[in-house]
Amino acid sequence: MKDPIIVTQNLSHTYSSNISNALQKAALVDIHLEIARGSCVAITGVTGSGKSTLVQHFNGLLRPTTGRVIVNGVDINAKGADLKMLRQRVGMLFQFPEAQLFERTVFADVAFGPQRMNLSRKEIRKRVISALEMVGLPHHEFSLRSPFQLSGGQMRRVALAGVLAMSPTVLILDEPTVGLDASGRAEFYSYLQRIKEEQGVTIVLVSHDMAEVAMLADWLFVLHNGHLVMQGMPRSIFTQGNALREWGLAAPPLSELLRLVRQKGVSIPDDIFTLEEAFTLLKDKSQAHWMR
Amino acid sequence: MSASPLIDIQSITYTYPVQKMKRETPSVPALEHVSLQVQQGEYLAILGHNGSGKSTLARHCNALLTPDSGRVLVAGLDTCDGEKQRTIRDMVGMIFQNPDNQIIATVVEDDVAWALAVRGLPASLIAERVADVMEAVGISHLRGKPPHRLSGGQRQRLAIAGVLALRPQCIIADEATAQLDPLSRQEIVTLLHQLNSEYGLTIIHVTHLLEEVVRAQRIIIMEQGNIMLEGRPADIFADLERLRQLKLAIPEPIELAARLRDAGLPISSEALTVEDIAQEIAG
């Protein structure tokens, strides 16, 4: 890869235990990966597979037990590595981020991060306003409202704006749409797409929702018991339904349907991936079938 | 229907106290003149987007909430009657989005036994029942483990076992799969169906995911505190446009089947599971 923004080499992480060595748990084992600048990658795996542990290395919240993590050219284990700067560059949105909202107004909540970055008031204001616009919560309408009177989806977007206001170059999202309903999800996705296209931010998405992965990610990493067991384009990984099942994962429902149809003897090329592609193919196929 | 329903909801209206305290804006009821009968042994799904009133409705079924007007009868008992609420909650158990909220003991077996123990049942009876329900939900092999070492799906099974130990007539699953990964989610839905078909347990399955309810006997869809649609799954899925208006995401396999059917392919509208649709497409 020419210019990866995140690289891990032989990354292993063992959670230590004060009580006994027997309780030590290897959360990550020998992970090598590269994430391309400006891409959107997804990391998936069942609960306990090491997804969250892995992404917490990307902004130095955790340090590798062995191996190296290099973010934007900086080795996070190096002496004198500026972790404060790293964390401004690598924004992280945790699970259920609406639980971290705390200020009286939406504006104050989004401004909390930038205020700790030695910026002028004018710059802070500019950033808050543009971050709110970016997530579809116009400043003039939402700034003075209490974040606690918004809907769940809007609260989550306020939390996202708080991270965006720090102008990160990498955005890490840990299960960003869990608990949102269909319309909340769709909105969140559309703003995420926009952030990706307009800001050129690299997005790392932790998710076990394969439909979400299929829609957003250019590249997919599959973790299992702390090992990186698969990587590739979502479209090619989802054709391997059986392998995914082995890791406790399910392909998106449409990929699963096509797999079953293939099993019943209908030939469908491996690269059929979207609803539109499947519809066109099956419609033509059956017309050809009747013409005979 | 002939037999009297297990749960009889008669034109209930409910407004959350927080809403009532707002002075300036008129308070918005979470439920408005909702009526619903749930039959013994039925598998009923309640759907709707966030804030549609589906959880509020479910919480009226076991007296966690009581209506401002109208009434709810569970096996003939009025949920507003304080003395009957204990009995009602034993009859209609509930599991929630986060199983950790109802897991309290440090060992799986003890957690299942907890509700029985506080009711002072004899130890031999408790041991027997605990073994039975752990078997029924498939966690017997985990009996000695601490709950926090279980996976999300296993913890949700444990929560179900704890409720089953009280021998309820009905279980309400309120978004019980929302925090699970897709395979665990499928497993919990399958378990609910098993409890329904093998033990005749009434199930009320609350969710915003259409793909979870294709095997339900009846679906109701809520919007703004009202029941907007009601019917068998095949009837509900006959109008995908309406479902979209109600802010529900259409499962892609069902959408594909519908589009192929509209294009003239002989695909039955009764086929809703991925397996059935694959069978129809392959002909």
Image (spheres, rainbow, N blue to C red):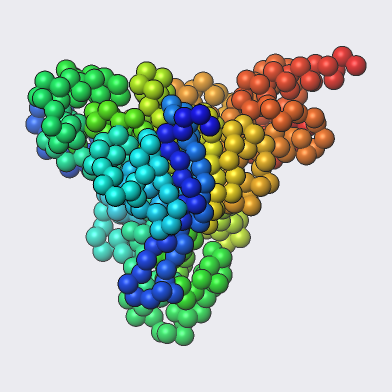
Q: Position of residue A53 (x, y in %)?
A: 40, 52
Q: Position of residue A275 (x, y in %)?
A: 62, 24
Query: Position of B92 compared to B211: left or right?
Result: left
Q: Nearer the viewer, residue B161 or A123?
A: A123
Q: Is residue A128 left or right of residue A249?
A: left
Q: Residue at x 51, y 20 (%)?
A: B241
Residue B251 placement, left or right of A261: left
Q: Please state the horizontal and vertical placement of residue B26, each as a whole percent of the image.
A: 16, 28
B181 or B164, which lies in front? B181
Total numbered labels: 0
Please, is residue A152 above or below residue B159 in the view? above
Q: Which image quarter is the C terminus of chain A in?
A: top right
Image coordinates of residue A110 in percent, x first then y, are 19, 31
Q: Is residue B102 visible?
A: yes
Q: Is residue B34 above or below residue A145?
A: below
Q: Is residue B223 above or below residue B139?
A: above
Quarter of the image where one finds residue A66: bottom left
Does the rendering let one see residue B5?
Answer: no
- Residue at the (76%, 28%) spot, across then down: A268
Q: Residue at x 46, y 45 (%)?
A: A8
Please, which residue is most extreme toward the front here?
Answer: A79
Q: Nearer the viewer, residue B30 or A86?
A: A86
Residue found farthest to the top: A291
Q: Give the image quarter of residue A89.
A: top left
Look at 74% across and 28% down and name the residue there. A269
Please state which of residues A92 and B7 is positioned toward the viewer in this rendering: A92
